[in-house]
Amino acid sequence: MTGTHPERAHIVERILAAQSHLEVRRSSGAAVSQMLHDDSDAAPGETLPNRRGDHDLNEIGMRPNPPLIPAAVLVPLLDHGDRITVLLTQRAADLRAHAGQISFPGGRIDPGDAHPEAAALREANEEIGLPPASVEVIGRLDTYEVRTGFEITPVVGFVEPGFDMVYEPAEVADAFEVPLSFILDPANHERQSRVFQGKRRFFYVLPYEDRYIWGATAGMLVNLFEVLTGQTARWR
């Protein structure tokens, strides 16, 4: 797979360097369930650095209760030569959960998936027709917990541009690209809030053109920002 953008080597270097603190959680398949919500090495009230989630910007006690459901998403980086973009999808409007929201291709880790990378590639192929052979997997971002009870492994990979995108209409309404430079500019990161079940909940938002990127997807993009820039995001 070829790529000519000068930032590509730097991105690979930063992602690979971030894997060191993830090695203790590299087990896959059935062992994933044993890792759920395990903060045994953390001080009381503290979360290990590779355990992110919707609770990050909120008070203690807002983490989802275990057991969590293992899931994986692909964070696809498209190298166009003169620029790098991140591919995102918009979920179908009639889905039962997170309808119409912006997301990464991904879903539950099935028993037949050898590891989270396999699940992310399978889901991307099913949702948008992305051939697994067109993805150069680099590594993972931090595990992300969502309030709906999922534990998500974000898998970062470079994607060969120009593949024939075919949406799974039951899951995906649209797909679009966001410049990586937009994500790496902290001026584009916002913190907003909503009242949910009587509590005010804060979350990251990255408004891009007419797209409202928020929640878990925005949180994982902020994690990508931190890994690639070495900066700590605002409000963390």
Image (spheres, rainbow, N blue to C red):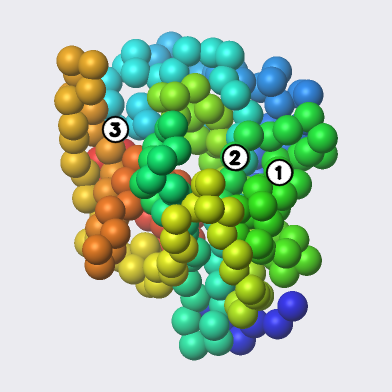
Query: Which of the two labelled residues, at mark 3 and mark 1, occupies the earlier sequence position?
Result: 3
- Upstream in sequence: badge 2 or badge 3: 3
Amino acid under disc 3: Leu
Left or right, 23 with reference to 83: right
Residue under the point 70% across and 18% down: 34
Q: Secondary structure at mark 3?
A: loop
Which residue, given by chain and number where applicable, does mark 2 sit on?
A: 107
Count neighbours of disc 1 (C-alpha within 10 A) and say few if under 14, some if 14 to 19, many if 20 or more: many
**Image check: 104 left or right of 155?**
left
Residue topped by disc 3? 57
Q: Residue at x 39, y 15 (%)?
A: 45
Write the residue at 71% across / 43% down. Answer: 119
Find residue 117 and report its horizontal and vertical position in percent.
71, 47
Tell me the distance, in whole angstroms, between the alpha carbons under discs 2 and 3. Answer: 24 Å
Front one among 171 and 43: 171
Whether residue 204 is visible here, answered yes or no, is yes
Determine crowd level at label 2: few under 14, some 14-19, many 20+ residues with C-alpha closer than 10 A. Answer: many
- Amino acid tagged 2: Gly
Please name the residue that numbered disc 1 is placed on: 119
Closer to the camera, 40 or 112?
Answer: 112
For the C terminus, the quadrant is top left
Asked if the residue at tag 1 contacts the one at tag 2, i.e. Cβ–Cβ closer than 8 Å, the answer is yes
| Residue 46 makes an appearance in the image | no
- x and y, in percent, of residue 224 in the image: 47, 54
Quadrant where the N terminus sits is bottom right
Vertical placement of residue 119 versus 33, above or below? below
Q: Amino acid at mark 1?
A: Ala
Q: Residue at x 68, y 56 (%)?
A: 125
Residue 213 location (% of width, % of height):
33, 52
